[in-house]
């Protein structure tokens, strides 16, 4: 079995703490306006849940999860615990 190491990368991310248009980054607001069947689309279900389309499937982000922006069509969701283990603030 081979061993793997993560590549150093800088990503943009924010912690989803409910709908707040003033604190959401511009790339997240743009994702809300993408067609709902395209990768990178985001749909706010209610104040504590947002759905992200990634790799052709829907991923649910709960309040407290991090939404990570790799590029325009690649958004990911990660729990706060996992995010804190994998990333440090740049």
Image: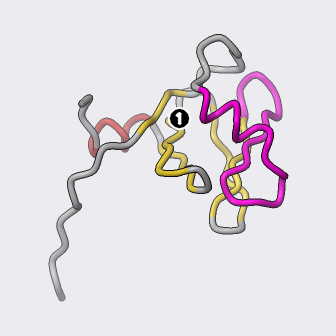
Residue 27 is one of the magenta-drawn residues: yes
Q: Residue at x 68, y 46 (%)?
A: 60
- Above or below residue 86? Residue 44 is above
Q: Which residue is mark 1?
A: 65
Which colour style is shown?
secondary structure
Quadrant of the image containing the N terminus: bottom left
Q: Residue at x 37, y 40 (%)?
A: 83
Q: Residue at x 69, y 30 (%)?
A: 29
Residue 69 is one of the magenta-drawn residues: no
Please report the bounds of the magenta region as a residue range.
26-49
Residue farthest toward the bottom in the current orientation of the protein: 1
Query: In this figure, what is the number of numbered marks?
Result: 1
Q: Is residue 31 left or right of residue 68?
A: right
Q: Nearer the viewer, residue 12 or 80?
A: 12
Q: Is residue 20 left or right of residue 1?
A: right
Q: Is residue 31 left or right of residue 45?
A: left
Q: Residue at x 54, y 46 (%)?
A: 77
- Above or below residue 50? Residue 20 is above
Q: Is residue 46 left or right of residue 58?
A: right
Quadrant of the image containing the C terminus: top left
- Above or below residue 9? Residue 79 is above
């Amino acid at each position: 079995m081979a061993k793997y190491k993560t590549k150093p990368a800088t990503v943009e991310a924010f912690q989803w703490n409910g709908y707040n248009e003033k604190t959401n980054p511009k790339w997240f607001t743009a994702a809300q306006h993408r067609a709902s069947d395209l990768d990178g689309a985001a749909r706010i279900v209610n104040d504590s849940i947002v759905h992200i389309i990634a790799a052709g499937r829907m991923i649910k982000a709960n309040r407290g999860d991090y939404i990570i922006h790799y590029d325009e069509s690649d958004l990911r969701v990660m729990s706060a615990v996992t995010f804190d283990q994998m990333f440090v603030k740049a």
